[in-house]
Image: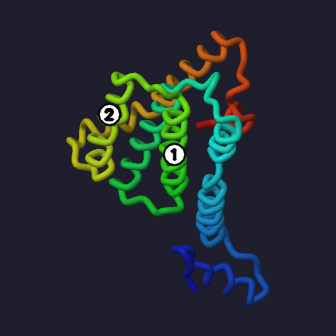
């Protein structure tokens, strides 16, 4: 019995015979189940921040560059997982996080009016390059280098937000869940 790429037959067969499944059967099952739990949990990670912006109609205290860098990091990580052919349970959260990050950046742009013309270069450049990266249509060496750099991108994505918090002496623009998120 297989569902969502998870083979339950091994575990169910052992339980039917009154024995506990062995680790060769149980560990892959637990791994897949945890993967799908993480995917499910990731579907709403950035929603509280988006809702807070919509409620207050303000992006005061938020750094657009920080959220743009996160979007780039999610794009690179997702592209790598897609290119390597990993199962959805291993990368699904990246797909949902990327969608939410794009919506969040668009929301920040919307409430940051007027946005200088120079600022629009970044999203236009992203829209031009992201499909190529997601399709894996770049040099393999460059692709590996991009993937290796995504951790640094996530780290450096925090710096503009930290600086913004320091300069306005507040982190009130950030939703509580986003203040302590790993990504």
Q: Give whichever of 106, 150 is nearer the camera.
A: 106
Q: Residue at x 63, y 64 (%)?
A: 27
Label 1 or label 2, whichever comes before in sequence order = 1
**Residue 37 on image: x %, y %:** 66, 60
Gap between marks 1 and 2 measured at Cα? 27 Å
How far across and down, in percent of the image, does residue 7 sit?
Answer: 57, 78
- The residue to which callout 2 is attached is 145
Q: At 63% from the left edge and 36% from the top edge, which residue is drawn? A: 182
Q: Does residue 89 appear left or right of residue 171 in this picture? A: left
Residue 51 in picture, x, y percent from top left:
67, 44
Residue appearing at x 37%, y 60% in the figure: 85
Hey, which residue is sitting farthest front in the picture? 114
Tell me which corner region of the image, top left, top right, bottom left or bottom right, holds residue 172: top right
Q: Residues within 10 Å of mark 2 (few under 14, many from 20)?
A: few
- Pick the quarter of the image with the C terminus: top right
Q: Secondary structure at mark 2?
A: helix
Is 62 or 130 nearer to us in this picture?
62
| Residue that protrudes farthest toward the bottom in the picture | 17
Label 1 residue SS? helix
Q: Which mark is residue 103?
A: 1
Q: Nearer the viewer, residue 41 or 123?
A: 123
Establish if 14 lies above or below 29.
Answer: below
Q: Residue at x 51, y 31 (%)?
A: 154
Residue 83's disc number: none
How packed is label 1: few (under 14 Cα within 10 Å), some, or many (20 or more)? some
Image x and y of residue 25, in percent: 62, 72
Q: For this view, does 98 lie left or right of residue 1?
A: left
Label count reads 2
* Circle nearer the viewer, 1 or 2: 1
- Location of the N terminus by quadrant is bottom right
Compared with residue 58, is residue 24 higher up or lower down, i.e. above or below?
below
Q: Identify which residue, 157 or 126, lies in the foreground.
A: 126
């Amino acid at each position: 019995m297989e569902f969502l790429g998870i083979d339950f037959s091994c575990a169910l067969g052992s339980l039917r015979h009154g024995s506990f499944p062995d680790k060769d059967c149980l560990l892959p099952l637990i791994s897949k189940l945890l993967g799908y739990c993480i995917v499910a949990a990731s579907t709403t990670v950035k929603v509280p921040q988006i809702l807070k912006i919509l409620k207050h109609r303000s992006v005061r205290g938020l750094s657009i560059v920080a959220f743009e860098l996160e979007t780039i990091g999610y794009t690179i990580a997702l592209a790598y997982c897609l290119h390597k052919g990993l199962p959805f349970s291993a990368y699904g959260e990246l797909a949902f996080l990327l969608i939410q990050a794009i919506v969040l950046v668009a929301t920040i742009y919307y409430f940051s009016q007027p946005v200088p013309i120079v600022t629009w270069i970044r999203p236009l450049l992203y829209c031009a390059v992201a499909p190529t990266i997601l399709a894996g249509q770049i040099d393999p060496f460059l692709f590996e280098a991009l993937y290796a750099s995504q951790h640094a991108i996530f780290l450096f994505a925090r710096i503009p937000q930290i600086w913004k918090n320091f300069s306005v002496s507040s982190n009130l623009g950030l939703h509580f869940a986003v203040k302590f998120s790993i990504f």
